[in-house]
Amino acid sequence: MKNEKAERAPVHYSEYLQLDKILNAQQPESGKEGVRADDEMLFIIIHQTYELWFKQILHELEIIRAIFGQPNISDNAPDIYNTVHRLQRVCRILEIAVSQMAVLETMTPLDFLDFRDLLRPASGFQSVQFKLIEATLGLEYEQRHGKGYYRAQLKPEEIARVQVAEEKESLLVLINRWLERMPFIKDAKYWSDAGEQASFWQPYRAAYAASLNEAEQGNLPTFDRLFMDDTHYPVAERRLSADANRNALFIMLYRDYPLMHLPFELLSALLEIDELLSLWRHRHIHMVQRTIGKRVGTGGSSGAEYLRAAADRHYVFKELAELTSFLLPRNRLPKLPARLVNDLSYR
């Protein structure tokens, strides 16, 4: 029998990491023009680092998408833990992306002006990987701010890559389907009225209505549209279905039961991703304002104003975020049937 380990060629650090390619991938435009611009090296390395992190995020999201693309996900399988772990890793990467902006901010406006005009029309807006991340998470083309400008700034092959990602089932679509399958509110064996959701939702609505102060009474009609009657559910306005919406709120309300721990951590990680992407965008806005003021971006956008409008629109999981409006404190939650409590607990 061959000793494959002994026959395998040794792996060297620089070769494994292909450092000759990475460390020679910085080619400042200022050097080509004979212009002194000492901070262009920093500018290039920061953005190359971002693209490497974006590649890792896409790697994690593709693993998660494969998990949720399954017809069923067993509660006894490691899939949900694996998903939560990878989503939390994405969150930690995005934290680095936000904090990395501080390094770029050591470049002053004059430092940037030394080489800025040499970059046109290159722009961070042309990052295909960032758009792939947005599409994979669930940002649709129609949701994008400045759709015509977005398409105009990419090469045809780059547009095609993003369109392929937009046509695939996004993480939001897959999470919606997974939430729809949760049986606890709908299963007839848990409720005395043959599976009608009044057994849970009528008592919950009463407790929720009692918790609202005078200024919050406007929440009740919204609650009724979202949770009480499918015929009034605003399907055209929402990407979560009525069942997925209800089940997501149930997970948030009863997260303390063992079977709800990981689903709650999963929803929390999705919300954290949206939050961190927003922080990254807003940090970028402030950096752009400080660096170029009211000038247009190198790619031709309106600069900080464009970034601000995009940041306000490009939330993916906002329907999950709004569910906090409908939470109750634990001491007001309706008591669950004993059989359901048993099925949500360790057995």
Image (tube, rainbow, N blue to C red):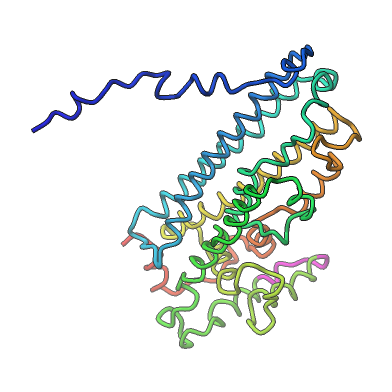
The structure residue drawn at horizontal position 90% and vertical position 34%, both measured from the top left corner, is 295
In the rendered view, does 14 fall on the left or right side of 175?
A: left
- The region drawn magenta spans 208-215
In percent of width and height, residue 13 lies at 39, 19
Quadrant assignment, res 143: bottom right
In percent of width and height, residue 152 lies at 76, 49
Secondary structure character of the magenta stretch overall? helix
* 72 in relation to 130, above or below: below
- Looking at the image, which residue sits at the far right? 294
* 132 in relation to 16, above or below: below
157 or 128, nearer to the observer: 157
- Looking at the image, which residue sits at the far bottom? 194
* 222 in relation to 189, above or below: above
- Residue 209 in magenta stretch: yes
10 or 222, nearer to the observer: 10
**Which quarter of the figure is the N terminus placed in?**
top left
In the rendered view, does 177 fall on the left or right side of 135?
A: left
In the rendered view, does 141 fall on the left or right side of 90?
A: right
